[in-house]
Amino acid sequence: MKAATLRIRTIDLGYEQMMIFDDGFGERVRVLYGATWLTQEGDGADTVLRPGVDRTLCDGRTLIGALEPTRLQILSGSAHGRPLLRRLAQRAWRWARRLQLGPVAPEPAC
């Protein structure tokens, strides 16, 4: 039986400072203090995270902006993986959408 490892990164953001994640699937963002605005590629709803609230990231690009001085944690573990075929399909969908290669069906939720 494999033991899951959890990696925690703590990040401080100043007022209106932003950071970008690419392909952060399965990672969780947890706010320790402050407030952040979080938007994910393919997700029509933005989220405001406050202390004690966390959000699991989907595949694709994620933008996090601090609404005030904020400290957050990024939690990632080796326990969650995705099948290779699903990762490739999601990447192909994103590229087709970026290149505007005709009508593209909505991306499946993570």
Image (spheres, rainbow, N blue to C red):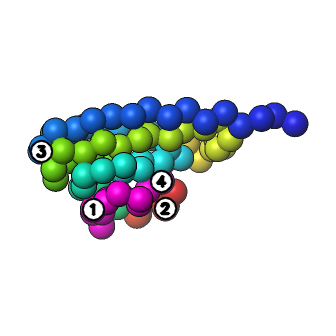
| Left or right side of 56 for 34 | left
Asked if labels 2 and 1 touch by Cβ distance under 8 angstroms, the answer is: no
Q: For numbered disc 4, what is the local secondary structure?
A: strand
- Looking at the image, which residue is at 27% across and 62% down? 48
Question: Where residue 109 is drawn, which disc sits there?
Answer: 2
Per the model, the C-alpha gap separating discs 2 and 4 is: 12 Å
Label 1 environment density (alpha carbons within 10 Å; few <14, some 14–19, many ≥20): some
Residue 34: percent from the left, percent from the top? 25, 52
Per the model, the C-alpha gap separating discs 2 and 3 is: 28 Å
Q: Is residue 91 magenta?
A: no
Q: Earlier in the sequence, mark 1 or mark 2?
A: 1
Q: Earlier in the sequence, mark 3 or mark 4?
A: 3
Question: Where residue 107 is drawn, which disc sits there?
Answer: none
Q: Give the residue furthest to the left.
A: 16
Per the model, the C-alpha gap separating discs 4 and 1 is: 13 Å
Question: Pointer 4: what residue?
Answer: 56
In which quarter of the view is residue 83 placed?
A: top right
User: Residue 37: in sight, yes or no?
Assistant: yes
